[in-house]
Amino acid sequence: MASVLIVEDEQLVRDTLAKVIPWQSLGVETVYQAEDGRQGLAMAERCRPDLIISDIKMPQLNGIEFARAARRAMPACRFIFLTAYADKKYLKDAIALHVDGFIEKPLDPEEIIATVRGALLRPAERPQAPGPAALFYGGSGEPSSGGRTFTLPRNYYSEFDLLLRQNRREDARASLRALFSQMAQCRSTDPDYIRSVFSRLAFRLENAAHIRGAAAAQAQSERFAYACAHVDTLAKLTDGFSQLVEQYFAEVDSLDPGLVAQVNQYLQANFSRSDCTIKAIAYALNYNDSYLCTVYKKKTGSTINTVLTDMRMELACRLLRQSSLKLYEVGRRVGYPNGRYFSTLFTREVGVTPRQYREQHHEQ
């Protein structure tokens, strides 16, 4: 019988997982609980669970830091992360840890049971991972260790994001064709690196779909981003992502090019200005601000302020990674002239302070 450790700072979520899931039928004899990453690490080292289910965003020690430390102590332990929409910034690191699954909040018992059952399969019963890189690339025999390796250009994500948001579909298709061709030729590249690239591209697509109000494309892109870690061939990744991009453009075409498109266009052009407010947008577009907010929320599921903040935080993260601007200068560049307010808001939205983010992600 297996043992499971649940690491989650919300007691209601811990209790739901511990009491609602039929652990015995899943082959689990013991369920341990911890309320944060530090306590979870101490308990993991003491109890040596077979599976850890951890929130990805926690105080004291977040899920990524906790998982890294636990993996060093217990390399064979399986991991499942609990995630919410706001946790997307952690997903690149989570995917790199080769976790066994993701469970999205709000929790769905059937999804939990299926994910846990898959993670607890015995090694011999688990789907075979594409060990040889040749299997991933669709060839025969191991590629030479001296062959070419693929590295994505640093600015590719932002350029691809721009093509999506500006609806430049032919340019986007051409860019992806060139990218996929280069990947296929660099057969000495670690397949996990390729998977992480596709996952990050899918999140870019998901974010663009969110901004454009393309709800179906947004949901499909999010699912694809999570699933990339377990796709066994490059061909499946390229085909699947190409279909997602076509779905995105088709859905954008079908949307009403009215209020939502006008608001999004205004935000794209003005989001970094400190005077970009709902009142300013409503005035510029000749709408009542209350009506504007109501209709936008109804059509997209998001508020204008949420989209505006997301766009500013994305630019702030890029400036912190790629520039040496002072923190207050970054705040001004993204529309927040008050440096203290920018720092507080950034910390709330991203989960770390601007200084910590720069230290962790700055590109040399």
Image: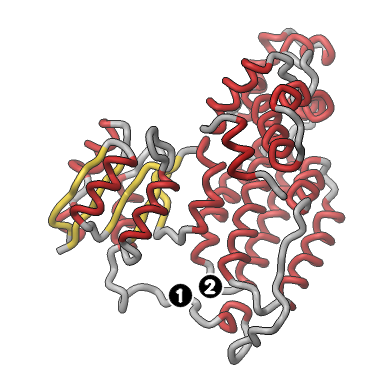
Residue 134: x and y, percent? Answer: 59, 84
Q: Residue furthest bottom?
A: 141
Q: Quadrant of residue 212?
A: top right
Q: Position of residue 130 (x, y in %)?
A: 50, 77
Spot occupied by residue 228 in the image (x, y as percentages of width and height) = 55, 61
Tell me whether the residue at label 2 lies in contact with that at label 1, contact meaning CB atoms closer than 8 angstroms. yes
Disc on res. 199: none
Tally the numbered discs: 2
Considering depth in this image, is 243 or 311 the residue closer to the camera? 311
In terms of depth relative to the viewer, which is nearer, 39 or 10?
39
Q: Is residue 274 above or below residue 6?
A: above
At numbered mark 1, what does the secondary structure look like: helix, strand or loop? loop
Side of 89 where 36 appears, left or right: left
As shown in the figure, which amino acid type bears the numbered disc 1?
Ala
Check disc 1 and report the residue beneath it. 129
Circle 2: element type: loop
Q: Nearer the viewer, residue 208 or 2?
A: 2
Q: Residue at x 80, y 48 (%)?
A: 159
Amino acid type at image mark 2: Asp
Q: Is residue 192 left or right of residue 19?
A: right
